[in-house]
Image: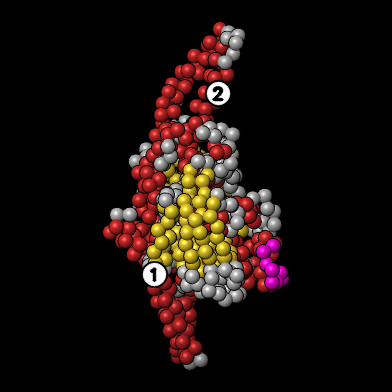
Amino acid sequence: MITVSNVSVQFGGTTLFKNVNLKFTNGNCYGVIGANGAGKSTFLRVLCGDLEPASGEVVMPKEERLSVLKQDHFAYDEYTVLDTVIMGNARLYEIMQEKDALYAKEDFSEEDGVKASELEGEFAELNGWEAESDASKLIQGLGLPEDILYSQMASLSGNEKVKVLLAQALFGNPDIILLDEPTNHLDIDAVKWLEEFLSEYFGTVIVVSHDRHFLNNVCTHIVDIDYNKIKMYVGNYEFWYESSQLIQRMIKQQNKKNEEKIKELKDFIARFSANKSKSNQATSRRKLIEKLTVEELPASSRRYPFIGFDMDRELGKDILQVEGISKTVDGVKLLDNVSFTLGRTDKVAFIGESEQAITMLFKILMEEEQPDSGSFKWGVSVTTSYMPVDNSEYFNGCELSILDWIRQYSVKDETETYLRGFLGRMLFSGDDVYKPVNVLSGGEKVRCMFSRMMLFGSNVLLLDRPTNHLDLESITAVNNSLINFKGVVLLASHDHEIMQTTANRIIEITPTGCIDRQGTYEEYIEFRKNNNV
Ligand SMILES: Nc1ncnc2c1ncn2[C@@H]1O[C@H](COP(=O)(O)OP(=O)(O)OP(=O)(O)O)[C@@H](O)[C@H]1O
Ligand SMILES: [Mg+2]
């Protein structure tokens, strides 16, 4: 259970939320929603004590343990997977370390013996004996092989690390679990497993997500951050969505009625205030107007960015030729003899069991990685721009303002007015552009990456899961931009809708090469079903 009283947070002059009063109780799963930059991650940081609110307080019972999904993918590189998971319960891990140190001592004294038995007692109380098998269950539930427990974190891929950090957050039955966008890097099976785990959880779960499907499946409550307020609603996402739409409609209708009434009264006053006999009536109507208020619809933080890709150069006939590319990483064959040729009207969705394989293919095409064998050739007219799945290298340790950050990528024009044009379309306006990029929210960083891509004017776009972190409005904007784009697209995405509406060709990367078919995503799924692929 967590109680939030009168909490307010602001950065600089901007208030994220004010006077928040909420109670989160056991057995419930709270879905935290809101636009990119609304303050979801910040709210979670306040809940776990990582950030001191400007006012108010957060209280939880002393005996309860709170656990948070860690965001730093490199923090545990020197530990094994098993240790990393067990560290989810800090006290248990500490006891294990102390025990090991004691038993390793050569001069084990009587005092040490007493200490050891105390530690053993606490260890047993915290289910220490089951720690390894509990960790193993979590790891396997998320689809990782059991023996990965004994690997170093440093040797794991990004996707594997995400799963281990998730297992860490869930380990040891914490009373309160805070998860910030846990499904972002998970495959469908792992998401399903997580949904089941959370649905049955005894404790308090608070989860930030942009994934409607996930929210519907797990949430008992919705916590919406908007209008500088945080409000809690009972029910799942769909219920929240429908009811919030209804409330908006009702306010609008009421406003419309009031406006009409006010206009009518004003007309009356204008007509009759000169007329002595009616002037009394006019005065009383004037009083009536004062009572009628048009309730200002508060400005929602949900806004649509505009994404549009213009090509500086027309495409020629040859686009891309890929021949027999193979690549093995850490003994796993990701790409096996992959060949295809792209034409100037192709918008290709890349799918496949291994997301790592698709990411690797994109990296090879962008010359960030070398294939073990095979080759590829871009056409002479081609200019590419690339959205990697992980954008951290563009922002980590970077102290530039948004404006200076985007300026690095502008070849044509570096003036503030020109750059503000791109940033404005991505919803960074006014003083926002002077914010340092390292404080930006996940979605805001992705919006920066889109501004950067738009600047390039390329005729071929490579997008590796571009909608991760984005809110619904931004996803719609990305989707429209890809539909309208006149050039060639190479796309990997979890988003069914985007795949279906963008792609006219599907290439599935398989363990033994690839399957390449013209047609939409749904046609491909149908084809797969009918042919037992
Ligand atoms: N230290 C800071 N100084 C100034 N602004 C900040 C700071 N930290 C965060 N912000 C701003 O506060 C806002 C809220 O950020 P937060 O990360 O909580 O958003 P979010 O709701 O989690 O968004 P997303 O959906 O993109 O993850 C953003 O506009 C962000 O740029
Ligand atoms: Mg966030």
Of 50 and 390, the residue lying toward us: 390
What's the magenta region?
408-416
State whether the magenta stretch is mostly helix, strand or loop.
loop
Query: Is residue 462 positioned above or below 124 on the image?
Result: below
Instruction: Identify the disc placed on residue 249.
Output: 1
Residue, disc 2 = 97
Answer whether residue 410 is magenta in the image. Answer: yes
The spot of residue 29 in percent (x, y) is 39, 46
Q: Mark 1 or mark 2: name the one nearer the start of the chain.
A: 2
Q: Which amino acid lies under the numbered mark 1 shown in the image of this protein?
A: Arg
In this view of the protein, can residue 64 be seen by the observer?
A: no
Secondary structure beneath label 2: helix
Looking at this view, name the residue that lies furthest to the top: 110
Q: Residue at x 39, y 69 (%)?
A: 249
Give amino acid for label 2: Gln
Residue density around tag 2, few if under 14, some if 14–19, many if 20 or more, within 10 Å = few
Point out the residue furthest to the bottom here: 275
The x, y position of residue 123, in whole percent, is 47, 22
**Looking at the figure, which quarter contains the C terminus?**
bottom left
Alpha-carbon span between mark 1 and mark 2 = 59 Å
182 or 388: nearer the viewer: 388
Q: Quadrant of residue 365?
A: bottom right
Which mark is in front, 1 or 2?
Answer: 2
Check if residue 160 falls in the magenta segment. Answer: no
| Residue found at the far left of this picture | 530
Q: Is residue 85 above or below residue 510?
A: above
